Amino acid sequence: MYLSQACKPRQSVFDRSRRDVVLNISDLLEDRIDSDRFFEENYITSGMGTLIDKAFGRLENTSSQAGTFLLAQAMGGGKTHSMIALGLLAKRPELRTKVLENNQVGSSVGVVKVIGFNGREADAKFGLWGELAEQLDKKEVFNDHYAPLNAPGVTAWVNLLQGEPTLIFLDELPPYLENAKTRALGSSDLSVATATAISNLLVAVDRPELSNVCVVISDLTASWEGGSGQLNTAITNLQNETGRSALRLEPVSSQGSELYYILRTRLFEELPEESVINDVAQAYAKSVKDAKEMDVTNASPDSYAAQLIESYPFHFSIRDLYARFKENPGFQQTRGLIRLLRAVVANIYNTDQAEGLMLIHPYDLDLNNDEILSEVKAINPSLGEAIAHDIAKEGFSVAEQQDSRGVRERPATTDFQDVAKLILVASLANIPNATHGLRESEVIGFLCAPGRDLSTIKKSVVDYLPTKLGICIGAKMADCFSKMFKIWLQNYTVWLILTTNRQLSKNYGLI
């Protein structure tokens, strides 16, 4: 069954104005979030579920769990979404039964007081502590800490927070600490005072008087090294002073099937029954079996089918290839992949490609679509010229021209473009020691699909492509690459040459 019949995308997928909406803690604190829509479009991951369970255990005063949770994942990895999910459940008891179903978490506590600080709000006149006190309508408790600004001690925090169950979110702190360095306080600065205040807060919540108070902190160590250094000092101080550590949680697991659940929940409103998914998986497995009998791939049909059942309606290779570039500087991990695939899904359905596709593959990126191209170039900006020359340029790239005219009596297909896009996605990483490119058997394995003729791909595409990209096999081979193909080689790991002439590649220092 094709995607158009089996899967119904959410309307938000087609609404470009919603694609760039990023919720933050301020939206939660100011009640700007539609909680029903939020939980409808967001999957509760294992890490998020653990946070909810343990935080409510703390708020209900039924757990000896330390009162601080550190959400440790790179930018765009689900930290703020996890906070918002917990915050909505804390503020609205009626949501708990609906969202958590048979889970009794939070059943013995009513409305929880939720306060927080968004580090992107750098203009907090009375510091982080003043902002939190004001949200509790207890600003006067910290009167001694405003003029001049000075960090509240442990006792001051206890005096502010004791009483009703309270949930405190500290999000995006590193950029705030970076900015706070510029604000002098005597012989020190606001960043030092803020780090001290955080450290004292974390110690305070482990006091018996605050056994129903919980602090959740997000970290951005990889993106804000200076600020996170200050933040980690506070965490270290907590460990040193209490002998206990904050519980570190990863909102989205980099292993397993969570990523597929997140993508399905966010992008699709309706999905088919298991029997339909099994039929699709078996159809792909049949293609893999045929390719294996032709000795062009070593992929296992059974493994292929099992992975597709897990990943449907996405091809399982998307997760594996995403893992290569998710650590790219500036890339927003889960959020970034959602943005990219939202654009891909919208394009597939808007252009009626969903009428002939059973799955969404890595090579279904329409790089002539401005939005998709923009997302890909944001992952690795250095590849723009190579994409235009070799893959997509409104019919004038090398791959497009080869597909349009056919080669060696082979009818026109998208095989050249699909191979090129597979290599592109496999080579988007721009971090040290990154893996680039694919083995020939992997390329053909990922191309396996019902209706695709694999019998001529190796000869007509894999072996033929180098000759159309300017490769000259000979004594001066290293001098024969065009300027654009040199860019290709630098970024893609010469996968074709690796498979056709490994020794020659070694001689010219290409591998």
Image (spheres, rainbow, N blue to C red):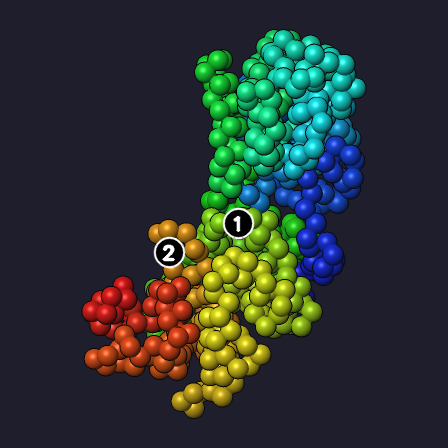
Which residue is situated farthest in the bottom direction here? 409
Residue 38 seen in the current view:
yes
> Which mark is nearer the camera, 1 or 2?
1
Q: Give the quarter of the figure containing the C terminus.
A: bottom left
Which amino acid, mark 1? Gly
Measuring from the top left, give residue 96's x and y in whole percent: 72, 31
Q: Check disc 1 and report its element: helix, strand or loop.
A: loop
Spatial CA span between label 1 and label 2? 18 Å
The residue located at (66%, 34%) in the rendering is 122
The residue located at (36%, 80%) in the rendering is 470
Quarter of the image for residue 460 reads bottom left
Q: Earlier in the sequence, mark 1 or mark 2?
A: 1
Residue 212 seen in the current view:
no
Task: State whether residue 399 is above or below residue 302.
Answer: below
For label 1, count other residues whose C-alpha is less than 10 Å away and answer few (under 14), some (14-19) or many (20+). some
The residue located at (66%, 54%) in the rendering is 267
Q: Check disc 2 and report its element: helix, strand or loop.
A: loop
Task: State whether residue 146 is above or below residue 299.
Answer: above
Q: Which residue is disc 2 drawn over?
A: 435
Q: Which residue is disc 1 drawn over?
A: 330
